[in-house]
Amino acid sequence: MDTAAARAYDDVLYQTLALEQTHPDRLATQARLFGMQPAPVERCRVLELGCGAGGNLVPMALASPDSEFVGIDLAARAIDAAVALATALGTKNVTFHRQDITDITEDLGRFDYVIAHGLYSWVPPAVRDRVLALAAETLSPQGVAYVSYNTYPGCHLRHSVREMLRFHVRGVTESRERIARTRDFAKFLMKANEGPTREQSFMREELAQIEMNSDGSLFHDDLADINVPVYFHEFAAHGARHGLQYLGEANMFQMHDRMYPPEVRQTLRALVGDDVLLREQYLDFMSARRFRQTLLCRDDVVLDREPAPAVVKQFSFAAPARPVSANPDLVSPNVVEEFRGRLTGAAVSTDLPLGKVALRIIGERWPEAVSFDVLLAAARERLASGAGAGADDEALCGVLLGAYYAGLVELHGRPPQFCLEPGPRPTASPLVRLQVKSGVFVTNLRHVSIKIEDDIGRHLIALLDGTRDRATLRASLQRYATSRAKGGTTVKVEPAAFESKLRELGRLALLVA
């Protein structure tokens, strides 16, 4: 059990953050879209292989007390940290085991969702095979497995830089020295590639990513002894050997070709026909994809690959969507309006009044999720008796499904639970209050990792335990701000700024009351 790999992760910690794409709600949503009947998120069993310090699993367990969560990792230091986190929060429905994946037996039972993030490409062949074998052995009949891995052709480009970095630190055994020398060498290469050629542009792009990586990511990804990308068709075939079939991607928009010109889409369809796996492989060729987050299910599950638009009626919708036009015409049936996300480049255009108003409402309600029935009623109420007020709700379903395929709109079977407006005694999530004491990354109640770099903001979050009213909070924050001021500078926490900060925390989905 005490392998070199485990010692490496004990030596240099790999920060474990929440991954929204692995959340059971996301996995269940994809499954339900394709006709499966996955276990409800409120009552399910979840297994995470390579769970690290529990930063992904513990927040899930905290939010779903009637579900059961199990995490397995080989690194002792990571497992100790995971147990400590769960214990500090009093989370009873999550357990962690320090164990080699190849030693796992069927004693753990069946799981509705199996997660293996950042594992498949970074382990020896026998362990890689065991990851998929375990998924097949432990998945419930309608279960979903998530597996992330590096892919070709994109990783051909990335690995050329990786090989240079590893060559430079050959013979260096001390971890911190390897990291420091790698960073210095990357800066040297960046300086050497300031020219105008395509090759230099490629080098700058790859080296910029190296610069942004944390020490843990740099050490365990770029400098790791094992980092084996595969072509998608190889991964799909590997899964098939264990009785697993391709379900989809954790991010549905990555399965579609809508960003390409019509002639490109037409050629792609001529090349692949109805072959789903071949289509996915060609999409990787077209985008030089380097990383996949693939969902698998048992091969005896019958999937509906062309869901009818009405399937979205069972979900709730969330998106930071805004119309591109400053004065959008939402009511005229022949006027096309484009909506974009504030946080992504996703875009959707429609001339359907009911669709335009619905997207506007979803954007206004962000970060809350709104159910289909509530959304439909609100959109029709805004249109009143105007053009499009009586439009078929099936047409709205088509707009919403298209917006989901484009990556503009989120679908939720179980909407995240949080308080948007701070109450009389504002209360932050207990997990967030714990996290701000030791770092800048916190996990909000939408299971998204966000960075709180404002020192005063972090202090305010730590105070939000539900025992203090606004006056007490502002006075405490004033004392803290004064103590942190430098050079005799006067810092005043104005009431308006204080209220604005509280509302910001609400919109970041950090508050429970």
Image (cartoon, rainbow, N blue to C red):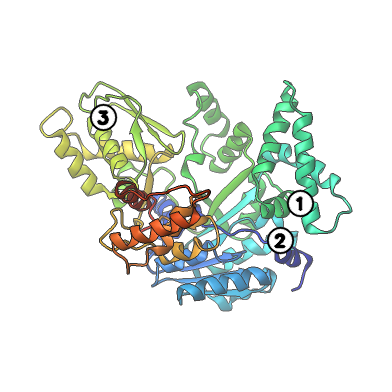
Residue with the most extreme left position: 385
Dot 3 crowding, Cα within 10 Å, few <14, some 14–19, many 20+: many
Marks 2 and 3 close (CB-CB < 8 Å): no
Marks 1 and 2 close (CB-CB < 8 Å): yes
- How far apart marks 1 and 3 lie (CA) works out to 54 Å
Q: Where is residue 305 in the image (x, y as percent from the top left)?
A: 44, 45
Dot 1 crowding, Cα within 10 Å, few <14, some 14–19, many 20+: many
Say if residue 369 shows up in the picture.
no
Say if residue 460 shows up in the picture.
yes
- Left or right of residue 21, residue 198 in this image: right
Which quarter of the figure has residue 356? top left
Residue that carries the numbered disc 3 in the rendered image:
352
**Residue displayed at 80% across by 52% down:** 178
The kind of residue on which mark 1 rests is: Ile
- Left or right of residue 391, residue 350 in this image: right
The earlier-in-sequence mark between 1 and 3 is 1
Image height of 4 relative to 412, above or below: below
Q: Position of residue 41 (x, y in %)?
A: 39, 63
- How far apart marks 1 and 2 lie (CA) works out to 10 Å
Image height of 84 relative to 153, above or below: below
The earlier-in-sequence mark between 2 and 3 is 2
Residue that carries the numbered disc 2 in the rendered image:
12
Residue that carries the numbered disc 1 in the rendered image:
179
The kind of residue on which mark 3 rests is: Leu
The kind of residue on which mark 2 rests is: Val
Q: In terms of depth relative to the viewer, which is nearer, 59 or 479?
A: 479
